Image: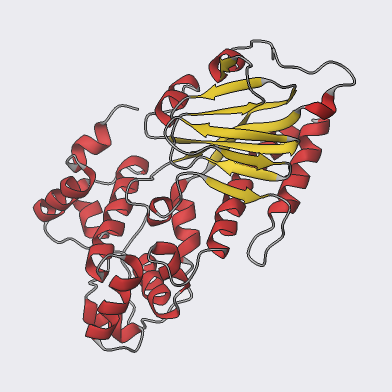
């Protein structure tokens, strides 16, 4: 339960990144972990169709990922430029667009649904010919509460990452090495460990992306790395139901209101109070989904004394009134 707290001190060491990561409730699943001999192709549907194929709840956003363990693959989006992924690299389709993964030309393409339903891999290489093809691990990350989540909104539609290059913020190579060991032996408890490692893998991918975001860019990730804006974001996330104003946020970062508002807006592309409202509505949506609290209590928790004003703001940002959001079918 998220409650407003009274606290006169505006300084905080609250971790806003952990807050938004927790809100996404990431999980994952490995779909394919096989070798393929060229020419071959597999068609991956868009996020909605993939979600239905996996029988995931409607509120789940399904993100396909592809790790090349050996060889290379080409990723060809239905609308977009193709991309070559080499051994030791990953592609993560945050945008959810339909695409094909393939190697070579002239081969047939099959739908991933055929493989997921228990169909045999028709591209399995013959003994002694594995070196010509590719070895892949393909799966999905499942995220929740993506609406108005600033981290999710800041992610690129297609993210290309090295799985071998260590970083100061992430431990992606170590996680993948551990996962490779677990999937290779599948001993007692391995299935549970792999599920947890998939969550960690997604988080480490996100941290690898954050590490490479330039401070000169506009967006939530760049704002998080700005010492002034990042501190203001942490204040908002630590107590979303407090009576925030531009003046109070500016005092918390020791800056004049006008200079603070300009710096915040330049970094995020949103004014401070617009950001406060959006995050409050994300929190309210989660409380409606995950608790039995009444709408009036939730309104109070996210800083609204007037339930009608809260309901209007909720519908404006999330498209439906709070009651309809809670009762929507999954």
Q: Position of residue 81 (x, y in %)?
A: 49, 39
Classify the position of the C terminus by image quarter: top left
Which residue sits at x=67%, y=25%? 104
Query: Would you say 143 lies left or right of 263 here?
Result: right
Above or below, comparing residue 221 to residue 327 in the picture: below
Above or below, comparing residue 78 to residue 240 in the picture: above
Which residue sits at x=69%, y=49%? 163
Q: Position of residue 311 (x, y in %)?
A: 14, 49
- Relative to the observer, which residue lies in front, 243 or 1? 243
Q: Mark yes or no: residue 189 visible.
A: no
- Relative to the observer, which residue lies in front, 2 or 22? 22
Q: Quadrant of residue 12?
A: bottom left
Which residue sits at x=59%, y=51%? 205
Which residue sits at x=62%, y=27%? 102
Above or below, comparing residue 271 to residue 310 in the picture: below
Query: Would you say 10 lies left or right of 112 here?
Result: left
- Relative to the observer, which residue lies in front, 159 or 137? 159
How many numbered marks does the figure carry? 0
């Amino acid at each position: 339960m998220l409650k407003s707290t009274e606290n006169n001190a505006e300084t905080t060491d609250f971790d806003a990144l952990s807050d938004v990561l927790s809100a996404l409730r990431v999980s994952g699943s490995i779909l394919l972990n096989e070798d393929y001999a060229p020419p071959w192709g597999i068609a991956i549907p868009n996020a909605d169709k993939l979600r239905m194929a996996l029988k995931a709840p409607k509120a789940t956003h399904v993100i396909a990922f592809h790790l090349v363990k050996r060889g290379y693959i080409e990723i060809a989006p239905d609308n977009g430029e193709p991309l070559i992924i080499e051994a030791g690299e990953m592609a993560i389709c945050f945008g959810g667009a339909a695409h094909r993964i393939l190697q070579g030309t002239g081969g047939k393409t099959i739908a991933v649904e055929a493989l997921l339903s228990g169909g045999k891999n028709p591209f399995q290489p013959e003994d002694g010919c594995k070196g010509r093809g590719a070895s892949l691990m393909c799966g999905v990350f499942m995220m929740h509460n993506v609406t108005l989540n600033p981290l999710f909104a800041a992610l690129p539609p297609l993210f290309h990452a090295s799985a071998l290059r260590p970083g100061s913020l992430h431990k992606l190579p170590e996680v993948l090495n551990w996962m490779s060991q677990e999937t290779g032996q599948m001993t007692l408890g391995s299935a549970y460990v792999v599920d947890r490692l998939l969550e960690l893998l997604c988080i480490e991918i996100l941290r690898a992306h954050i590490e490479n975001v330039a401070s000169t860019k506009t967006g939530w990730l760049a704002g998080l790395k700005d010492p002034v804006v990042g501190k203001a974001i942490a204040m908002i996330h630590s107590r979303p139901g407090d009576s925030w104003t531009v003046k109070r946020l500016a005092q918390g970062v020791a800056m004049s209101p006008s200079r603070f508002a300009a710096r915040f807006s330049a970094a995020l592309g949103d004014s401070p109070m617009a950001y406060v409202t959006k995050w409050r509505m994300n929190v309210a949506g989660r409380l409606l989904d995950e608790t039995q609290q009444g709408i009036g209590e939730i309104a109070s928790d996210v800083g609204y004394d007037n339930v009608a004003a809260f309901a209007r703001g909720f519908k404006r940002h999330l498209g439906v009134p709070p009651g309809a959001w809670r009762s929507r079918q999954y």
